[in-house]
Image (spheres, grey):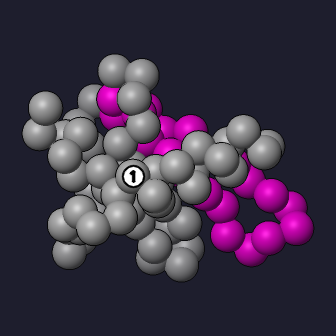
Amino acid sequence: MSQFTDLFCWVLAASEGEPQPAIFTPPENATELTLINDECPDYISVWFVDGRPVAAAMPMDNFHRVISSSLTK
């Protein structure tokens, strides 16, 4: 669980200062990994494209972050 949380936080740091979409749509061909914690009302997800993290979210809080530059390479 701590590795997943670290990865989520890494995506947040990597996306800092990058333009964010007004409406979040998972990247094409992305794989979503989700962590559900029974102690918390929300869950967190991280999306990967070709093995690289490209987005993270807490969907029930409508919180999404995308590493925009990773999607244009």
Residue 25, by quadrant, is bottom left
| Quadrant in which the N terminus is drawn | top right
Q: Residue at x 28, y 30 (%)?
A: 29
Residue 73, by quadrant, is top left
Asked if 66 appears above or below 64 in the picture, the reply is above
The secondary structure that dominates the magenta segment is: strand
Magenta span has 44? yes
Q: Residue at x 39, y 29 (%)?
A: 52
Q: Position of residue 56 (x, y in %)?
A: 46, 54
Numbered range of the magenta stretch: 30-49
Mark 1 residue crowding within 10 angstroms, few (<14) / some (14–19) / many (20+) = some
In this rendering, position of residue 43 left or right of residue 67: right
In this rendering, position of residue 34 left or right of residue 56: right
User: How many numbered callouts?
Assistant: 1
Residue 26: tell me if it is visible: no
Q: Amino acid at mark 1?
A: Ala
Residue 9: tell me if it is visible: yes
Seen as rendered, the residue at the extreme left is 72
Asked if 27 appears above or below 66 in the picture, the reply is above
SS for callout 1:
helix
Q: Position of residue 19 (x, y in %)?
A: 19, 66
Residue 31, by quadrant, is top left
Seen as rendered, the residue at the extreme bottom is 61
Q: Nearer the viewer, residue 9 or 26?
A: 9
Q: Residue at x 39, y 52 (%)?
A: 14
Seen as rendered, the residue at the extreme top is 50
In this rendering, position of residue 3 left or right of residue 67: right
Q: Position of residue 33 (x, y in %)?
A: 56, 39
Q: Position of residue 62 (x, y in %)?
A: 45, 76
Residue at image mark 1: 14
Seen as rendered, the residue at the extreme right is 39
